Amino acid sequence: MSTTTIQLTVNGRATDLRTEDPAMPLLYALRNQLGLHGLHFGCGLAQCGACTVHYDGEALRSCVMPVSAVAGARIVTLEGLGTADKPHPLQQAFIDEQAAQCGYCINGMIMQAAAFLASNKKPTEDQVRQALAANLCKCGTHVRILRAVMRAAEQMA
Amino acid sequence: MSRHAPLSRRALLQGSGALVVSFALAPPAGIAFAQGAGTPAPARSVDPDEVGGFLAIDSQGRVTLYSGKVELGTGVFTALTQIVAEELDVPLERVATVQGDTLLTPDQHPTDSSLSIQAGGMQIRKAAATARAALLDQAATRLRVASDQLVVQDGTVAPRAGGAGVTYAALLQGRSLSMKLDPAARTKDPKDYRIVGTPVRRLDLPAKIFGTFDFVHDVRVPDMVHARVVHPAAVGARLESWDDTPCRDIPGYLRAVRQGDFLAVVASDEWAAIRASRALVAKWGAGEGLPDDTRLVVWMRGAKVDRNEVLQRTPGPSAPLAGAGRQLRASYDFPLNTHGSIGPSCAVAEFKEGQLTVWTPSQASHMLRRQLATMLRLPEDRVRCIYVEGAGCYGRNGADDCSSEAALIAVQTGRPVRLQWMRHDEHGWDPKGPPTLLDYRARIDPRGQVVAWEADIFLPERPMKRSGVTLLGAVLAGLPRAGPDGPGTYNPGLGIPYDLPGSQLTAHWLLDTPLPAAWIRAPGRMQNTFGNESFIDDIAAATGVDPLAFRMRHLSDQRGLELLERLRQFAKWQPRGARARDTGPLARGRGLSYAKYELVRTYVGLVADVAVDRRSGQIHVERVFVVHDCGQIINPDGLRNQLEGNVVQTVSRTLVEQLTFNRSAVTSLDWASYPILTFPDVPQVAIDLIDRPGEAPWGAGEPTTSAVPSAIANAVLDATGARLRSVPFRPAAVLAALAGAPSK
């Protein structure tokens, strides 16, 4: 079998991904080839959101997106959203609200909310609840996550 | 990409050749790792009776805490760091923590039962207090000042009156803290606390929020290969044949591993391992047969009882059930649950020169070491388990099973291997919280007094066919098993927290339970409280007494009474009883629940406000009020985070979660078939903390959980007159209960 090379932009950097199987989900390329560990494998079924990244600005479940389908795309991961020195308002809000317990789902919460807030200024709490309805957390951190997203929304408005 | 090589304790303590990286010292690296540490040195003492078992202070004055209790997402990493920094009078940033490494940390027993602070933290506090006292004595000699005339600030001991001081580092000069832990060591007066009792921000959160944290899923070791397991098609099924011919076309595929009924595939990259696990052809025999999952109560009633045991008999004379007045009888049941960790279990194992190293998210690395040693017939000192955080586990999920399977593959292949379970492995094969049944009988005399109270609880016995919590790898491979006997449901602290004279709780220990079982948050305690607090409200309703007044009337525990009084004010509780119910499509009500955890510690009072949609049967928990007394609070914000989590997670278990299985195996293998509570249905949570700095700190990871299901059930009763006795309270069950409810 031949190796396929897929060119795309990851966190602002032109990147080549190589795979023996074009159907391999993007998640494995990002985690194992690029060492980006902010996104997590949760279900492999697009049901929980732990693997969420941005694809041309939209929230995308990387666990089901074939790597061949992201050629030419702009992918942003949690690492590319902001850093400790230059945090995204959501990352700062999650720290300010201490909005994590185990933290495994938090990548998805932040990435989903960031994509939502980019096109929804000043949302109501109900709108945020709907926007995050397909992101699962088992620790029960929801009330803090809601507070953090509302706080970030205010900052970004 | 981080490299994880075993870190020797000696190298750590010598401070040379190895680098301890902690959240506090050098964020964002998540866990300790070594650079050029080489072969592990023989372990120094990890004796929990030695101060040096827990603490070291290096030549730079940096403190390392070696904790046997581990961070499971609950915030104990930060809280334990606060305790050490406080007791030693050093800044928080100067304390690094190594957790759950069998070579480096004392065995403080599993991180469970809400005991990390209460038991583990207090051991650590005593170790720090012993160290502090010894260092003060040394400083007194050095400075020629009486030790009670010395003060410590930022790790420097100096005369209270002023003048030159001496640092801990200078006093120790790199020597270890080799002294017996003094259980009578004087700990700091809480009125002098500066760090304990404050809402210090979680030390691990920035790395988790910026994507730089190393979970166990991110551990990489040199030459590592990837594995996936192929679990049996049915519980107890034998592997009849297998064929990996289709796998051989997959680039990167290396081999299959088979031992007994254990089957796995190994590949040089992760996706190839996943593809191979799907391509592998395996033929399984019939399983051992599971009960009908829609008739579990009937199954429990028919299950063989191994023995009966009276767990509680309250003081005072008891009256017979038969007699003047009226009798009440009720039964309640709680179903199986999966732990439902968002990240499936993962472990990395390496077997080199007869030495097994496992990087594991186990809540019990020392116990896992014993179990792995038994399974592989290795001396215990040939097994090292290193804790690395996984996703939240809430008990004994698949972590230890996955670790045992990674170990089997590492031993067979001789390659370091990373095994991650897929979603269906975690949902299908984590040991389940066992189903529980409770029966109650009471007599209320003509004056409205409860004169007789009898309760029965049906729980899996230990040990028994299935409830021994063993390693799945050992079970499947047919290797020796060792492990804790029971699924954690046994507890001497089951019973009622009220003064009802002569009341009795009898446990009926069942010989079997439908699926392999283990503990999930508040095991047995939650089910017990669900029954107690529901039946209390049934009695209050039958006698026309307000549920809060009824509880306070039957309580003499002053702390409990104070808590309920706080709850009355905090939730603005109005006596129920006499008011008219909503008659429209949406019925609102509120319910109350009270627990004194295990009858000896943390007090919780809870009020739930619900809205019941009479047409759809949907219950929405709108708001939950919690009043909580766990004695001394180490970190109030961490505590609130835990209580919020207790509430939301247990609302999910009460209203939504329902495990399904057929006669062979679990069928709810993903989040579509085993849904959990999602954002639109999450209640608001209001918390009132009672802080008692002068008292011992008690646990908070579980007690609130125990009070949630009954508060919801009682609120539904208040709203509709319908009593829900069987969890989960899904719409069809609610509609059925509404149809049978007395109209009012």
Image (tube, coloured by chain):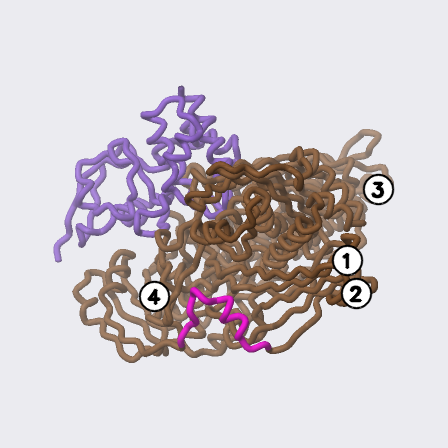
Chain colours: A purple, B brown
Q: Earlier in the sequence, mark 4 or mark 3?
A: 3
Mark 1 residue type = Asp
Residue at image mark 3: B147
Side of A154 relative to B142 (left or right): left
Asked whether, in this view, residue B684 is left or right of residue B148, the answer is left
Q: Residue at x 33, y 26 (%)?
A: A118
> Residues in magenta?
B289-305
Q: Pick whichever of labels 2 and 1 is earlier in the sequence.
A: 2
Describe residue B415's horizontal placement relative to residue B73 as left or right: left
| Residue that mark 2 sits on | B319
**Residue B221 at x, y = what percent?**
38, 56
Which element type, helix, strand or loop, lies under badge 2?
loop
Q: Nearer the viewer, residue B163 or A90?
A: A90
- Circle 3: residue type: Ser
Q: Which residue does the numbered mark 4 point to in the structure image?
A: B229
Q: In the image, what residue type sits under mark 2? A: Ala
> Quick check: marks 2 and 4 in contact, CB under 8 Å?
no
Q: How many labels does the image show?
A: 4
Tag 4, which secondary structure? Answer: strand
Element type at mark 3: helix
Can you give x and y, in whole percent of width and height, for residue B133 in the image? 78, 47
